[in-house]
Image: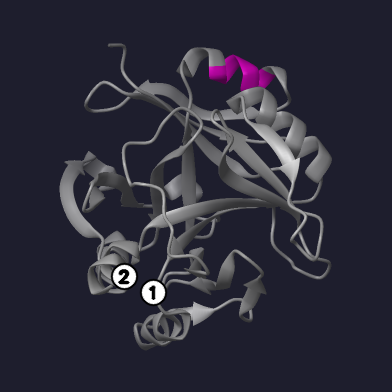
Amino acid sequence: MATAASLRLGRPVWYELMTTDTAAAETFYKKVTGWTSAPFDASPTPYTTFKRSGDVGVAGLMKTPDGMKMPPFWAMYAAVPKLEEAVAHIKRLKGSELSPVIEVPTVGRLQMMKDPQGAAFYIIEPSSDEERPEKAPEVGDASWHELLTTDATAAMKFYNEVFGWQPSEALDMGAMGKYQMFNRPHGMIGGMMNKPPEMAQVPPHWLIYFRVPDINAAAERTKANGGKILNGPMEVPGGDWVLNAMDPQGAAFGLHARKAQ
């Protein structure tokens, strides 16, 4: 059990879009990513599940609760063996709570947290010990986790201590500083960087990339369905292609395609 718990710690297991117009967002992402969708009936409030091929759940969609003063955004859920222990650890490291503990039957107990620089994320103690094998992301899966923050060095230390994420390769970006990539036991899952000056007014945040078969076709679908391309498509070291975009409601997201084989 100790081994299972240690492998669970820090594994990104779910992604969630909180937005102002769930019907419009559902249509947009299905057209851009090729997901299917279905209502999740166990939720006390309306909740939609996005699925990739094979009927595999990838992400959720819900309306921003009344009174919550947050723009539409994508959030990451990272698994922990014991919720209360993880919350206490995060608070000791100067992180903080953004929500009470939420219990979802058959899913688990979860809580929205904030890292010391201000980026929001969820932790979840899953109710089941059954887990899909951890392997390279398929088309439709979340494939990269990118933190844009005010102190990437401090953030890497925080997430290393909380989730066991290991800093790996670093890319020198010149005046923009260092892009620090990080790994889980099965391989690289993301990177962290300081926000560029033009994003000074944007709070620190996690940007989630979803894998698509073809980056240029996905860019065209994004624009054709009311989204906006913010950056790219561009080739990244290793030959893969990425873009940064904003959906029609204003939530930022990324798309990622593997290099041509």
Which comes before the other along the chain, label 2 or label 1? Answer: 2
Which mark, by number, is residue 186? none
Q: Is residue 222 above or below residue 210?
A: above
Q: Residue 42 vs residue 234: left or right?
A: right
Counting from the top left corner in percent of width and height, residue 7 is at 28, 62
Screen quadrant of the N terminus: bottom left
SS label for mark 1? loop
Crowdedness near tag 1: few (<14), some (14–19) or many (≥20) residues, C-alpha within 10 Å: many
Please give the name of the residue rendered at 50% of the width and 36% of the height, measured from the top-left corner.
254
Residue occupying the point 31% across, 12% down: 260
Q: Are marks 2 and 1 in contact (CB under 8 Å)?
A: yes
Q: Is residue 179 above or below residue 45?
A: above
**In the picture shown, does residue 67 fall above or below 234?**
below
**Taking the image as drawn, is residue 43 in sight?**
yes
Quadrant (top left, top right, bottom left, bottom right) of the C terminus = top left
Q: Residue at x 68, y 29 (%)?
A: 30
Helix, strand or loop at disc 2?
helix
Secondary structure mostly seen in magenta is: helix
Residue 195 is at least partly visible in this image = no
In the displayed structure, 247 sits above or below 146; it is above
User: Can residue 220 be found in the magenta stretch?
Assistant: yes
Residue 166 belongs to magenta span: no
Question: Could you give the CA–CA distance between mark 2 and mark 1, rounded to whole angstroms?
Answer: 6 Å
Q: Going by the image, does 39 lie left or right of 15?
A: right
Q: Which residue is mark 1?
A: 81
Query: Residue 68, position in %: x, y?
Result: 75, 68
Give the residue number, with chain letter if any, for mark 2. Answer: 5
Give the extent of the magenta segment.
Answer: 218-223
